[in-house]
Image (cartoon, rainbow, N blue to C red):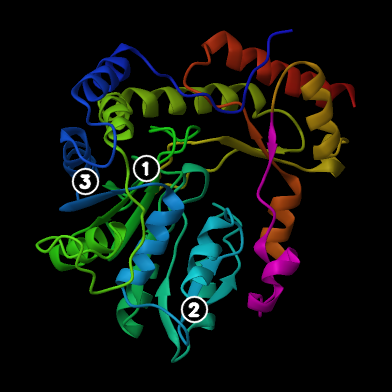
């Protein structure tokens, strides 16, 4: 039986050619032309001055927080519905994460909930552009400005997404991206920190490379990390970046087909796209109302799996995991409801139009037969 994965990268001859160049030249570690080229090109694509390539999106977040001086005694506001890396990066620093609920219409951090969480210990906000949909950045920027808070955008799932015509990752003091194998563009593992602050970018570069003084080799003035990207990874990333607009248009086409095929099915809420947003639909995500659809989400997952269709549940709300309960000081009705009913459908750019229509047909038929 043919299987339809949730996400699958498209790797072609351009990536292979760059990797061969890196390997034949011997530049396979954290030195080589592809790293700086990838940093410059990706920063330029997002519309930010400086890029610092990292070993993952998680290490990008950690570097961002450390570079901003966030640590014990500080608080950082994070959304309840996100991958655990967002909150873990805060915990790495010794700071306290404070979890807030999400907006019911577009599933990202609710700006109205942020202000409730601000106190004299608050130092930063990490808005997460979830599943490729932007956060509502204007009120977040306004709150951050009013309380003198840092914004660290977690754009791991939202390469190329736009808020009011401007790419996400260009609003914060720092933004962080992931290039894991299932992301819109990939380096296998890898990430990027972006900023418009040259001094901050230099601090991040030093922290990324063991805290070593760049002008005095083996001289360490701060405790740093080994969070570097390899030249081989950057070689893949640079080739992927040349295709990003094509990938995004394919993602949006997949979303249009799913919406067309599933819009009339009772009990399905389609992946949102607000009027102020350009969503890149990293994963096309729907909600299943068991009362209207007459089937529970997990039952639908099992039946789709039998047809060779891989799906994923939404992330668990952070506040529901015992590990993070101490950082949940509010109520979280929206994230609880959306997480319980959320389902990610296959969304890889290698899917054909017929593939997407087949998957949508199976979803529709399973629900109609229930």
Residue at image coords 20%, 33% = 34
Distance from Cα at disc 1 to Cα at disc 3: 14 Å
Residue 185, given in percent of the width and then of the height, sits at: 38, 32
Mark nearest the camera among 1 and 2 is 2
Residue range highlighted in magenta: 311-332
In the image, is residue 197 part of the stretch drawn in magenta?
no
Distance from Cα at disc 1 to Cα at disc 2: 29 Å
Mark nearest the camera among 2 and 3 is 2
Vertical relation: 77 (above or below) 275: below
The residue identified by callout 3 is: 43
Residue at image coords 54%, 52% = 106
Would residue 109 be seen by someone viewing this image from the given angle?
Answer: no
Would residue 166 be seen by someone viewing this image from the given angle?
Answer: yes
Residue 220, given in percent of the width and then of the height, sits at: 23, 69
Residue 26, given in percent of the width and then of the height, sits at: 22, 27
In the image, is residue 317 part of the stretch drawn in magenta?
yes
Which class describes the residues within 10 Å of circle 1: few (<14), some (14-19), or many (20+)?
many
- The foreground one among 57 and 257 is 57
Q: Residue furthest left?
A: 215
Residue at image coords 31%, 32% = 237
Evaluate if marks 1 and 2 touch, with contact meaning CB atoms under 8 Å apart. no
Q: Earlier in the sequence, mark 1 or mark 2?
A: 2
The disc placed on residue 161 is 1
The disc placed on residue 109 is none
Q: State the image quarter where residue 27 is shown.
A: top left
The disc placed on residue 95 is 2
């Amino acid at each position: 039986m043919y299987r339809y994965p949730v996400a699958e990268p498209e790797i072609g001859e351009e990536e292979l050619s760059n990797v061969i160049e890196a390997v034949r030249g011997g530049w396979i570690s954290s030195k080589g032309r592809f790293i700086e080229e990838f940093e410059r090109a990706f920063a330029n694509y997002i519309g930010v001055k400086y890029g610092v390539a990292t070993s993952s999106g998680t290490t990008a977040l950690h570097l961002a927080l450390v570079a901003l001086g966030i640590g014990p005694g500080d608080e950082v506001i994070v959304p309840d519905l996100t991958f655990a890396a967002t909150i873990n990066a805060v915990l790495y620093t010794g700071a306290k994460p404070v979890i807030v609920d999400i907006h019911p219409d577009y599933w990202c951090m609710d700006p109205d909930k942020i202000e409730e969480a601000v106190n004299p210990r608050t130092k930063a906000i990490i808005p997460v552009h979830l599943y490729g949909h932007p956060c509502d950045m204007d009120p977040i920027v306004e709150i951050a400005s009013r309380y003198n808070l840092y914004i660290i955008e977690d754009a791991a799932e939202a390469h190329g997404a736009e808020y009011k015509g401007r790419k996400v990752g260009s609003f914060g003091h720092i933004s962080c991206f992931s290039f894991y194998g299932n992301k819109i563009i990939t380096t296998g593992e890898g990430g990027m920190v972006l900023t418009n602050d040259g001094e901050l970018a230099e601090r991040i570069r030093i922290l990324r490379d063991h805290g070593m003084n760049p002008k005095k080799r083996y001289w360490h003035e701060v405790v740093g990390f080994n969070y570097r990207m390899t030249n081989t990874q950057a070689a893949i990333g640079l080739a992927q970046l040349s295709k990003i607009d094509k990938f995004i248009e394919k993602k949006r086409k997949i979303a249009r087909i799913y919406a067309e095929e599933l819009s009339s099915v009772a009990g399905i809420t389609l992946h949102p796209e607000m009027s102020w947003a350009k969503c890149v639909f990293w994963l096309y995500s729907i909600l299943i109302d068991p009362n209207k659809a007459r089937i529970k989400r997990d039952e639908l997952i099992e039946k789709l799996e039998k047809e060779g269709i891989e799906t994923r549940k939404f992330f668990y709300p952070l506040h529901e995991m015992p590990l993070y309960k101490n950082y949940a000081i509010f109520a979280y009705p929206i994230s609880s409801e959306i997480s319980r009913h959320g389902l990610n459908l296959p969304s890889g750019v290698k899917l054909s139009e017929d593939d997407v229509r087949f998957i949508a047909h199976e979803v529709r038929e399973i629900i109609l037969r229930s």
